[in-house]
Image (cartoon, rainbow, N blue to C red):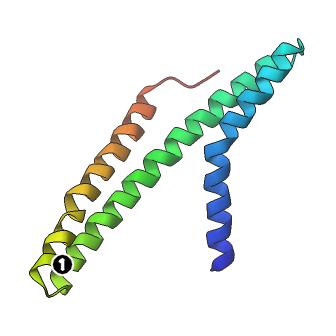
Amino acid sequence: MDSLIDVLAWLLIGIAVGPLLLLGLYAIASYFGLGIADHILALTGRFLALQWFSGGVLNAVGGIALAALGVWAVLHFDPLLHRLLAALLVPFGLWRSYLGVTVLRAISKTEDLP
């Protein structure tokens, strides 16, 4: 299980940093007038779309998990203060889910990149 978590962590880091590295590579290739610069820029656009998609999915799933954790904590904690603090997780989780779904809907309405 540890290796699966490691692989997922590295995958998310790669998705987050990949477009920035490709953009830097594009800048270098464009500066030297290489013909591959346009292909690198197109690949950067595809990686950015993947970054937005993975961020939307992560926000939607993470928001649902936060809301569920808040409901569970409200039902299982005893002191009133702990229940009130746990209840704050529910609207925050639903807000994150809403943002994630909004990003996913916006991505589905855009045209495919060339």
Local crowd size for mark 1, using a 10 Å CA cut-off: few (<14), some (14–19), many (≥20)? few
Q: Is 91 situated above or below 5?
A: above
Residue 102 rendering spot, x and y as whole percentages: 34, 39
Residue that appears at 63% across and 46% down: 15
Say which residue label 1 marks: 82
Classify residue 112 by image quadrant. top right
Q: Quadrant of the N terminus?
A: bottom right
Residue at (65% x, 72% y) in the render = 4
Residue at image coords 44%, 33%: 108
Q: Is residue 55 above or below residue 65?
A: above
Residue 82 or residue 113, whichever sits in front: 82
What amino acid is at disc 1? His
Q: Position of residue 103 (x, y in %)?
A: 39, 38
Q: Nearer the viewer, residue 13 or 50?
A: 13
Residue 80 position by quadrant = bottom left
Residue 111 spot, x, y in % from top left: 50, 23
Residue farthest toward the front in the current orientation of the protein: 81
* Above or below, 23 relative to 52: above
